Amino acid sequence: MPSTHASHAPNAPKAVSILLIDDNHGDAMLFREALEGERTCHSITLHVANSVDQGIALLSGAGTSGVRLQPTIILLDLHMPGKDGKDFLRHRKESAELLVLCVVMLSSSTRQIDVDDCLQLGADHYRVKPIDWAGYQTLIVFLRQFWD
């Protein structure tokens, strides 16, 4: 008899977990709103860390919940006070558990040296932060490849 387990049902939403590490509250809110349209097809959970240290804590289980987050994708801002995105990428290189996670840099910087540095440090992709709603929709289309 065929299995009817819910996770194998053809119309069951796929669970997606995203960790956004970004100190800009406004950008996080816009990204959250842009994700709303995707929730009809997927069960998407967005976790937001306001700093690299907070992001690392969530990924290591040292956060307030004590649960180690294992996101489908990490979106990482480059320029933040204190430790920045490059510091996170250096930390990631030292952790076998973090190396398996996909990291997309999401920065307002269009400087080629920033792109090259981030990719050299191990970022999987580099995207310029959207500046309008259409840009966020384009970003969501790009990110869909990681959970479809």
Image: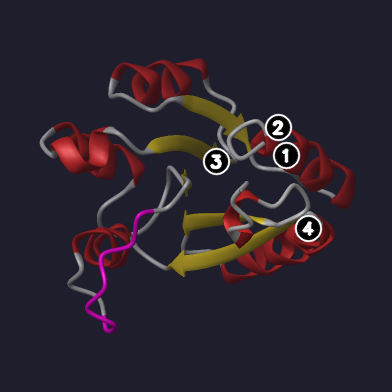
Q: Are marks 3 and 2 in contact (CB under 8 Å)?
A: no
Q: Which of marks 4 and 2 precedes in the sequence?
A: 4
- The furthest residue to the left: 94
Instruction: Label the magenta part by its dominant secondary structure.
Output: loop
Q: Which residues are magenta?
A: 64-70
Query: In which image quadrant can residue 120 be found?
Result: top left
- Magenta region includes residue 65: yes
Q: Say if mark 3 contacts mark 4, CB within 8 Å.
A: no
Crowd class of label 2 (few under 14; some 14 to 19; many from 20; radius 10 Å) = few
- Nearest to the observer: residue 77 or residue 113: 77
Q: Residue at x 20, y 68 (%)?
A: 61
- The answer to which of marks 3 and 2 sits earlier in the sequence is 3
For the residues labelled 4 and 1, say whether their Cβ atoms are less than 8 Å apart: yes
Question: Which amino acid lies under the numbered mark 3 shown in the image of this protein?
Answer: Leu
Mark 4 to mark 1: distance in Å?
A: 9 Å
| Residue marked by disc 2 | 142
Q: Earlier in the sequence, mark 4 or mark 1?
A: 4
Q: Amino acid at mark 1?
A: Leu
Which numbered dot is residue 93? Answer: none
Figure check: 29 above or below 109: below
Q: Which mark is residue 106?
A: 3
How far is the residue under mark 3 from the one under mark 1?
10 Å
The Cα–Cα distance between marks 3 and 2, rounded to whole angstroms, is: 12 Å
